[in-house]
Every structure is written in structure tokens, then in C-alpha cells.
Amino acid sequence: MAHLSPLIRQATPVLAARGEGVYLYDEGGRAYLDFTAGIGVTSTGHCHPRVVEATRRQVATLIHGQFTTVKHKPLLTLVERLGEVLPPGLDSVFFANSGSEAVEAALRLARQATGRTNVVVFHGSFHGRTIGAASMTTSGTKFRAGFAPIMGGVTVAPFPYAYRYGWDEATAVRFALRELDYILATISAPRETAAFVIEPVLGEGGYVPAPKAFLEGLRERADAHGILLVVDEVQTGFGRTGKYWGHQHAAIRPDVIVTAKGIASGFPLSAMAASAELMSKAWPGSQGGTYGANAVACAAAIATLDVIRDENLVENSAVMGARLLEGARRIAAKHARIGDVRGLGLMVGSEFVLPDGNPDPAAAQRAQSFATERGLLLLLCGAWGQVVRMIPALVVDAKQVDEALAIWAESVRDALAQ
Ligand code: PMP
């Protein structure tokens, strides 16, 4: 009998039968508060009625209109609607199916547009699992390490992860920018460096927001050297951080945005946006894909944009995120073994440490398991799995946030009593 490959490591034993809003239900009808949102994919909540209706209608009309062969209405409407929310100037949009593919697309675009080969990425970043994207991924022990030969031309620069270095933020930013200058002088010269690729909040790497001054320092260096600034908004886009785009917390203008996850409420769709001028430097026809801009996924994305706008989900993410962060900090204040709680909007992480300050993934995992038993689904992140993250759908309300925090308080107490 066939079985699910052990390559998949399931975070919980839950067998999901149905989803509604912020809840998942198992076969027996037991409700779980889903504070994973499928890693931030179900931005509008599970099975939002408007997404269900729009996709139901689309399935009966046209499922697949291969976008390198024909255009279709959902594709054209989606491009127009994205134009209303993308930063000014980034009005040329390309579609793929996953975050990894959109990262690969950006890498190809950057190489073609600049004629340069290299990229600089930041330690702790996650950009995907395809070999190119995995070569740019150092958020964990199983993505880049062990897969040699990786793609050439990738240099990993320090990310200002102040808490882990034991520094204040200003010191961490100064260190990271000086190291970057050192790298540009000695390892990846500007004339061979096509792009910096950065997440506005390290996602898989531990929910560490990139300090404003760091992002602004990257922009300055990109301008000085003709290097493109590619912002990976796969996890931080579409309101997740309390602004439409994560990079909008800083005064920067990306050259390329890569996004996926929250774009289509769970349907496979990703996008890359840049200026028409930049896109025109790439060779027409050099990018494509069988399933890119699938009509049903486009319809889901249009409905998702409607729901985000009509239900004020970006504002809700900011307000509920602040409530969640404050609550998680109140709980951590009682436990020295939670060394740091941080986040932006509805991305909140609690980092577990041993008494010597080193990562404590075992405690994080115990806290996650106790939470699952009590009906709250959570995910781990951080290089060692030492951070428990909360990432509910953007439709979450105050009562659900408080309910999750009550379960979290008990789960942490039990996990650290052992
Ligand atoms: N970039 C970031 C920032 C991500 O968080 C992820 C997924 N966790 C990816 C890229 C890759 O996306 P996918 O799994 O859809 O390939």
C-alpha cells in the first residue's frame, strides 16, 4: 500500500476535514484555532464565502487558460486590480505557482536585466526549496547545507538579528551594513552583483523584522552600485504585517517584489512585479510555465483582494497583531526561558532559550504540542526550530486572539515545567 513519503514532516497529528474562518475541524468535528493559516496562505480565513463563490463560478466557466497561449479575463482583471495595491512604478506583473518559482523568476530577471551573475542574500532567509532558491536559503539546517553543489554566485551576508547576537538593534544594523560593504569589496564586487534579495521580516528564519535603518542602508547601496533590490514578500505581503507590504514599514522602494501565499487564499499562485522598464530588459519568452496564472487561482486572488479591501483586513492585521504581540510578551515576562517576543502585524514569534541563551528547540516543540492538544495550531520557525510563531488569518478577532493567548499561557507553563 502506498503511503505519504517521510520527506514530509508533519508538525501536528491533526487530520483536517473542514476549514471555516480561523478554525479547522477534524474528522470527529473537533475545532482547532488555526494560528498557522497554512503558513499564512489562508489570509481571508479558511473557505471565505466570497472566495468560494468566485472560484465556484470560475471552475464552471474556464479552469485553465494557458497564459503563454491565450489571455483570459481573470488574468487581465487581476493585473489591473494588483495595480491598485502594488507600490507605484511596479506595474509590470508576471505569474507563477509558488513562492520558490517566483524567486527563481526574479533571479532570472535580475541576471538578464543587469548582465551580472551574483546575488547577495541574508543569513536566516528563506526563499524556497528549488535548487536556485535553496541556494539562497539559510533559515534552517536542511535547505542549503547538504545539497552541494549549490547554485554559484550566492553570497550570504549577516542579517541584523539583534537578539541572537546579544546586541541592541543599532549595533546589529551597523555590523550588518559594514559586513555588507566588506563583502561588496572582497567577495561579490558590485560589477558582478545583480541583486540583494531580502525578506522584510525573516519568516522561516525566526520572525525577525528587518530594522528600518537596515532596509534603508540596502537601498542606498543598491542605488550607489546599480544593484537591484528584490524584496521577498511571499510571507509578508497582502496585509500580513499590518501594512499592505512588509517593506512599507521602511522608507524604501523595491525594484522587484516577489509574492505568493496570501495572494489567493490558498490557491496556488505567485507573482513577481517590477517596472515595465526593468521587465523590458529581459528577453520576451524567457519565462513562462504551464500553470502560471491559472484562471481559478486568478479568480481566487481577485476575490481575496476584494475581501482584504472590504473587510479592512490590513488594519485588522495591525490592530490584532498588536494585541497578540502584547499578550505574548505578557506571557513571556513570566518565563526567562522565552528570551524574546517579536513581530510585525499578525506575524508574532516567541523564541525559546536555554539558561545560557542558546536556542531551545525542545521547549518550543513541547509548547507547540501542548497547544495542539488544547486545540491551538502553531508552527515553529528559526534555524533550530526554537521559535513558536503565531500567524492566524487576517480575519481573526479579539476574542479569538484572547482565546489563543489563554491556551498559549497554559502550554508554555506546562512546557517549561518539564
Ligand atoms: N519566500 C518566503 C519568504 C517564504 O516564506 C516561502 C515559503 N515559506 C517561500 C519563499 C517559498 O514559497 P513556496 O513554498 O510557495 O515555494
Image (tube, rainbow, N blue to C red):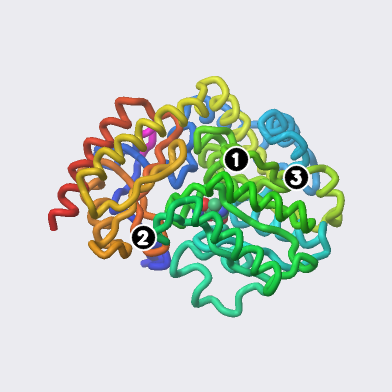
Measure how far apart labels 1 and 3 are at the Cα level: 18 Å
Amino acid type for the residue under numbered disc 2: Gly
Placement of the C terminus among the 4 image quadrants: bottom left
Amino acid type for the residue under numbered disc 1: Ala
Q: Earlier in the sequence, mark 3 or mark 2?
A: 3
Relative to 208, 181 lies left or right? right
Identify the residue at image location x=50%, y=33%.
Answer: 242
241 to 339, vertically: above or below? above
Highlighted magenta segment, given as a residue range? 18-22
Name the quadrant containing residue 261.
top right
Magenta-drawn stretch contains 279: no
**Of 269 and 191, which appears nearest the observer?**
191
Instruction: Residue 97: give x, y in percent of width and height.
Output: 62, 50
Instruction: Residue 175: give x, y in percent of width and height.
Output: 54, 61
Q: Are marks 1 and 2 in contact (CB under 8 Å)?
A: no
**Of 335 and 380, which appears nearest the observer?**
335
Instruction: Residue 316: give x, y in percent of width and height.
Output: 46, 26
Instruction: Look at mark 1 in the image and give the residue it sits on.
Output: 250
Amino acid type for the residue under numbered disc 3: Ala
Residue 122 tag number: none
Identify the residue at image location x=33%, y=35%.
Answer: 326
Total marks in image: 3
Dot 2 falls on a residue whose secondary structure is loop
Q: Are marks 1 and 3 in contact (CB under 8 Å)?
A: no
Instruction: Look at mark 3 in the image and give the residue it sits on.
Output: 274
| Residue count near mark 1 (Cα–Cα under 10 Å), binned few <14, some 14–19, many ≥20 | some
Relative to 89, 272 lies left or right? left
144 to 350, vertically: above or below? below
Instruction: Look at mark 2 in the image and give the residue it sits on.
Output: 385
